[in-house]
Image: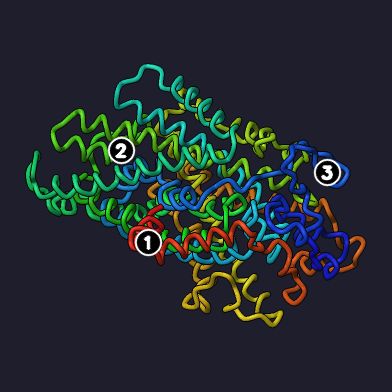
Amino acid sequence: MASNSSAAHGDPVPSRDSIDSGSDTMGNPDDHDDTPVLEQRDGSEASVGEHVLPRTGLHRGLSARQVQMIAIAGTIGTGLFLGTGKSLANGGPGSLLIAYLITGFIVYITLLLLGEMATQYPIAGSFTAYSGRFFSPSYAFALSWNYWANDAISVAGDLTAAQLVLEFWDVKYPWVASLVFWLFLVAVNSFHVNAYGELEYWLSSLKIITIIIFIIVGILVNVGVNQPGYIGARNWHIEGAPFKDGFAGFAKVFVTASFAYGGTESLGITAGETKNPSRNMPRVVKFVFWRIIIFYVISIFLIGLNVPWNYPNLSTRSAATSPFTIVFSMIGSNVAASFINAVILTSVLSAGNHALFAGTRLLYSFAAAPKPIAPRIFARTTKRGVPLIALLTTSSISILCFGSSFIGTGQLWGWLQNLVGVSNQIAWFSIGLASFRFRRAWTAQGKSLNELKFHLSWTKVWGPPFVIVATLFLILVQGYSSFTPVFASVDFVSYYIEIPLMAVFFAGYILYLRPWKTSGQPWYKLDLPDLKTVDLVSQQYEEQEVDRLDDQKREERLKGKTGILWRVYYLIA
């Protein structure tokens, strides 16, 4: 990548390349000659500076069908199926619905901004790379490691949630199942990226079918088709509802809502391995709106109607029950309840699979950058393009899930949920910052935003500032409940520990480099890129011949006699 930013800020501070993922080697090689790993399909070694890596790096093996399905339901997992129970118990049905609506809107705008950058620069590392390129390498360094920890902890959280789901069948040693699931996830991710994509496609398809069935069953249960008779809005009027614990309960729901929506931003990470990203990434991002409305809001509304906030074991220190399982049990069939619980278990695997994939690719991108922020060994890949060492390192954090025996499964899962939820919010905040700086740089260099490969003009003025302010507000206020009625130190730590950790990583990066010693300028002038000279050319994806043939084939299908059927196929596939 031929960035001119280091020239603008002096040699002592690494350019945005130090955080940028140069690992995306699947584009036009002429656009970034100094990318860390050169494209070779013959299995020969590729050099990275003075280092030699055994493979070429990542492969563009995710099809439009797989990426679309991952976008629709890939990250739907414990947050929706199990976390909604904790949200309902904490805030009541009113807080649950409003908090998920607000968070869903923030996520949608965030994904539009990310999609704009990911379509222009489809690289592994995604928003962490954009933060370093357009905002601050020091901040991006802190963000990168924070988000890698997010994904690693998410895997641990999903394996812990699996233990909670298994309690429905009174499994004696649920930690054994977590170990088996861990081995399965590592094995799947050890194969070609297409194995990950195909597994996610079918698991996501199952989740979509399940949610549709749940919506139908939820409506039937509410109108009284089976026991316990007509429910209507009765659970909104019981004692404590609809806003349990007032503002404290309402604020507490935001972190679990953020956990539920979390992972959507990692779609940008899949851009580095997505075929024809110029066409597929905008399609994926636009579809998020319908995903939020159909899969989250309608499901949340029905849960609030049918399940009382004080349902036994909905969310306790030692246990948690899925509202989805509760609703299915209301139709009077243990078989139906067992079926939905089994589906929830597969969704846990799906969410863990997605988090492990994203965390592995992030760690790979840290090491594969021209100026790495992780040891080069993490950039080594197998002949199938799998960063195996990064995979094993990321998955090793999952040992946290086995702490449930000492803490209590419900309690441990709640803490992990808080950590991941806050980390998701920091990621959304960072996407807003990166987008704000990217758009300003684009216009500062005489370009029109309409020249971008993907841009929605209605977000032009307010999009990035809205995301920045809204997510910052969530980060600061959601821990209000830890102060009242008495100060809860552990809850406080789980809500806010990531803020000082980000500051430590940020300061440590600056102090380690000490750029002011050689330049004589304040560090902040060296760390903040000049919008007029920041590199806007490198790592843009140039369409390949296979992309043009794919587009041509698509147009021919749409114009043919079966064009209507193909339109439906491209809408859902």
Instruction: Identify the residue shown where x is 33% and y is 52%.
Output: 295
The answer to which of 484 and 430 lies nearer the viewer is 430
Q: Nearer the viewer, mark 1 or mark 2?
A: 1
Instruction: Identify the residue shown where x is 66% and y is 75%.
Output: 442
Is any atom of residue 214 visible in this view?
yes
Q: Earlier in the sequence, mark 2 or mark 3?
A: 3
Q: Position of residue 236 (x, y in %)?
A: 19, 53
Q: Earlier in the sequence, mark 3 or mark 1?
A: 3
Residue receiving disc 2: 322
Q: CA distance from mark 1 to mark 2?
A: 36 Å
Q: Residue furthest right?
A: 518
Q: Residues within 10 Å of mark 3 (few under 14, many from 20)?
A: some
Residue receiving disc 3: 47
Q: Quadrant of the N terminus?
A: bottom right
Q: Nearer the viewer, mark 3 or mark 1?
A: 1
Q: Earlier in the sequence, mark 1 or mark 2?
A: 2
User: Which residue type does callout 3 highlight?
Assistant: Ser
Q: CA distance from mark 3 to mark 1?
A: 44 Å
Q: Position of residue 303 (x, y in %)?
A: 25, 48
What kind of element bears circle 3? strand
